[in-house]
Amino acid sequence: MTRRSYTLYVLGSISGTLLVVGIGLLVGRVFHKLMENRLKKEIVLVEGSRVFDSWKNSPAPVFMEFFFFNLTNAEDCLTGAKPEVTQIGPYTYREYRYKDNVTMVENGTMVSAYTIKKFVFLREKSVGDPTVDNITTVNIPCWAVMEKMKGSWYRTIVSMFMKNLGGGVFTSRTVHELLWGYEDAVLEKAASYSPGLDKEFGLMYKKNGSDSGEFIYHTGEQNYLDYGRVKTWKGQSKLTFWTSDESNRIKGSDGSSFHPFLTKDERLYIFTPDLCRSIHMDFEKEVEVKGIPAYRFTPPRSVFASKEENPDNKGFCVSKKECLGTGVLKLSPCRKGAPVVASFPHFYLADEKYVDGIKGMSPNREHHQTFLDLNPSVVIDDASAAKLKKLLVISEVVSNFALFIVGLGGIMHVILIVLLVRAHQKKSSTQEVTSYCPVSVKEKEDPQNGTYIDLTKKVDA
């Protein structure tokens, strides 16, 4: 075997082997499955895993932006006029969140934690000073007392009593007071008759530096789909605020983390104590966050739909007489009876009657849609984005390694074909231009080497 033939044989063997192996790995998605299995073992909520420290102390910055509706015709509203409001904001706070008292429970299959949230005001990202800017809005403490007295014979007496204390249906307070609390004369008087009752009120009262109760999470070791899923909240596996089992179910994560390998066709569930319920989100489109590919999930209209539009929501009706329409959720059962109603901004996705009921509402999908981009699920800093990009590149290279093998085998196979064609062409050319004939008719004899024939190039006649 000549050197050229040996080279062609080796090249053919290698290229064939690479093609067969590469195609087999590609069809079987071997490297992709290896990568998935490795990540499933790494992304678990146990000590020493890659994600455990970042789960306890999120490195990504979170910003809370508060907007308020300032009532501009409070006096006219008292005589039956339609409320007119103007939006003021944002008042932006940097939210620092970390998990405290983290403990492995149930033989290490679950993890218990308390999420602490602290808020720091950012003047450079806000429209004004929250300790100076005043907002005129509804007086929620007074409304709460009146709601308690609804149908009672002494409601009129209580109303007169509140007026003497300076309490009305509307109030003007600073942004700081509305958020973090202020002493209310009505609540102070009520506290004197009901020991233990708070005499302060605020939308975020006692929520700066506090937690929302104990959560117990699945670690994801037994099933990666359970990663971060809430098992119990405050020791309960289901809620007691609502009137149906479906409405009281605790489903999904707490919104801070989700299982790996999300797909576009799955529905995400998030349990949020602020809404006292679980909500769901569906895939909308692919986006990029700081150059990182992500899936955008948004809550559909069905989340806050009426019971007629979505029968699963019938349990959120406080009573038959207080079953609100699409787009709003009454939170009284978990707000100590206070008349608090939740909705998307500007009554986005709500019935038109709510939008038309207040002058100044202008629901807009671009500005008022709630969405979640995964990965990541919050605004990400540049350092974390660079690290995540590197991990994504490594994952992409490993996952497509079989394709690289097929490509290399294909290139070597093409080279082999080219060499074979060239060798065949050279052989054919040599046969066409060269022949052999004796120099003379008689063969020459050599006494030592025997008979030989002289050869010369053939020349056409």
Image (cartoon, rainbow, N blue to C red):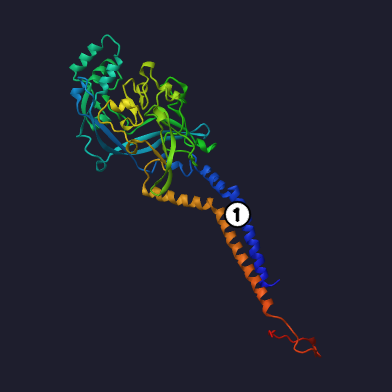
Q: Nearer the viewer, residue 221 or 377?
A: 377
**Crowdedness near tag 1: few (<14), some (14–19) or many (≥20) residues, C-alpha within 10 Å:** many
Left or right, 374 with reference to 415: left
Residue 131: name its quadrant.
top left
Residue displayed at 20% across by 25% down: 74
Reply above or below: 131 against 315.
Answer: below
Question: Taking the image as drawn, is residue 240 in sight?
Answer: no
Residue 445: name its quadrant.
bottom right
Reply above or below: 155 against 449.
Answer: above
Look at the numbered disc 1 and give the secondary structure of its residue.
helix
Q: Residue furthest top?
A: 153
Reply above or below: 454 against 97.
Answer: below
* Count of picture labels: 1
Instruction: Give percent across and percent down for residue 341.
Output: 33, 25
Instruction: Give percent across and percent down for residue 229.
Output: 47, 34
Left or right, 49 with reference to 201: right
Q: Amino acid at mark 1?
A: Gly
**Residue with the mark numbered 1:** 22
Instruction: Give percent across and percent down for residue 195.
Output: 29, 17
Q: In which quadrant of the rendered image does the N terminus lie?
A: bottom right
Instruction: Give percent across and percent down for residue 232.
Output: 46, 28
Q: In which quadrant of the rendered image does the C terminus lie?
A: bottom right
Q: Nearer the viewer, residue 307 or 156?
A: 307
Residue displayed at 63% across by 68% down: 421
Q: Nearer the viewer, residue 123 or 245?
A: 245
Question: Taking the image as drawn, is residue 286 in sight?
Answer: yes
Residue displayed at 40% across by 38% down: 372
